[in-house]
Image (tube, rainbow, N blue to C red):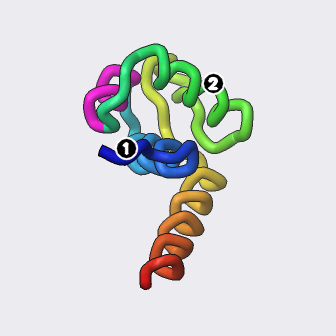
């Protein structure tokens, strides 16, 4: 099994959180452990790609900037296919 890159994992987390998701949901859907997800979420929040919803600090949602990241990542995947 090939290891996933940082960009691949970040894009996967952002896709999962598009409509809002809790940390546990992200862990299971992205097939990662809690410690790794916690690290990624911290980085993604710092970069403004994901944010916690104001009404519930437990739900995470991809920001507009995060959606742009996902779209650009998909475009690169298409270009990189041979």
Of callouts 1 and 2, the N-terminal one? 1
**Up-down: is 2 above or below 36?**
below
Q: Is residue 19 visible?
A: no
Give the camera-side residue of 55 and 39.
39
Magenta run includes residue 13: no
Q: The N terminus is located in which quarter?
A: top left
Residue 26, percent across and down? 36, 31
Q: CA distance from mark 1 to mark 2?
A: 16 Å
Single out the residue that lies furthest toward the front: 1
* Mark 1, residue position: 16
**Up-down: is 40 above or below 4?**
above
**Up-down: is 34 above or below 32?**
above
75 with respect to 48 (left or right):
left
User: What range of the chain is rendered magenta?
Assistant: 23-29
Q: Which mark is residue 42?
A: 2
Question: Could you tell me which residue is drawn at 37 percent across and 20 percent down?
Answer: 33
Number of numbered discs: 2
* Crowdedness near tag 2: few (<14), some (14–19) or many (≥20) residues, C-alpha within 10 Å: some
Give the camera-side residue of 13 and 36.
36
Give the camera-side residue of 52 and 33.
33
Secondary structure state at the residue bearing disc 2: helix
10 with respect to 58 (left or right):
right
**Up-down: is 45 above or below 56?**
below
Residue 53, percent across and down? 52, 29
């Amino acid at each position: 099994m090939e290891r996933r890159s940082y960009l691949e994992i970040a894009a996967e987390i952002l896709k999962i959180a598009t409509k809002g998701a809790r940390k546990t949901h992200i862990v299971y859907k992205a097939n990662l452990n809690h410690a790794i997800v916690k690290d990624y979420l911290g980085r993604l929040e710092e970069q403004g790609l994901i944010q916690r919803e104001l009404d519930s600090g437990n739900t995470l949602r991809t920001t507009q900037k995060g959606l742009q990241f996902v779209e650009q990542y998909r475009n690169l995947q298409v270009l990189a296919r041979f």
